[in-house]
Amino acid sequence: MSSDVVRQAIDEGNRKFGEAVARKDYAGLAGLYTESARVMPPDAPIVSGRPAIEEFWRTAANALGMTGAALKTVDLEVVGDAAYEVGEAELKLGSGQAKVKYLVVWRRDRDGTWLLHRDIWNTMAPN
């Protein structure tokens, strides 16, 4: 599979992620992850599996007043059915905006859909 095709699929996944955040659709957000996905938020335990990921995003988004997320791929490497994305995200929070850097390992599902499999991030210092 060409890296351009994978890049388009990941761009679409990132767009859907942002839309789910804006709609407060945490089940839809969790559905963008593999069944065995792991989310590794800063200063917090690892969150494993879709049900726990759904609850994590619901709790975190409500606590932060998160109303939007715009994700941008900075670098992408595709290796078979996995893709390694380095990116930056701008988050709309109740307290203003925050910028984060992230690393996501994407995995191609049996049906060909690219899903988040490992997700880790931390904040970026303001410029």
Image (tube, grey):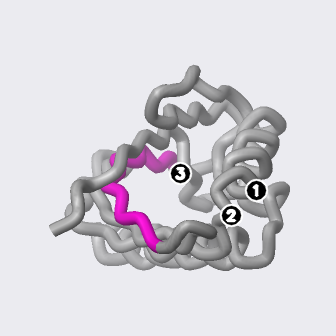
User: What residue is shown with label 1?
Assistant: 62
Foreground: disc 2 or disc 3? 2
Please state the horizontal and vertical placement of residue 104, each as a whole percent of the image.
41, 48
Q: Is residue 6 left or right of residue 52?
A: left
How many residues crowd mark 3 within 10 Å: few (<14), some (14–19), many (20+)?
A: some
**Residue sitting farthest toward the top:** 45
**Amino acid on which the number 3 mark rests in the picture:** Arg
- For the residue carrying disc 2, how many other residues have a C-alpha within 10 Å: few (<14), some (14-19), or many (20+)? some
| C-alpha distance separating marks 2 and 3 | 32 Å
Whether residue 12 is visible to the viewer of this picture, yes or no, is: yes
Residues under numbered marks 1 and 2 in contact, where contact means CB atoms less than 8 Å apart: yes
Q: Which residue is mark 3?
A: 108
Residue 20, placed above or below residue 52: below
Residue at 59% in and 60% down: 112
Q: Main secondary structure of the magenta part?
A: strand
For the residue marked with disc 2, what is the amino acid?
Gly
Q: Residue at the spot x=55%, y=58% of the render? A: 114
Q: CA distance from mark 1 to mark 2?
A: 5 Å
Residue identified by numbered label 2: 65
Residue 18 coordinates in the image, percent (x, y): 60, 74
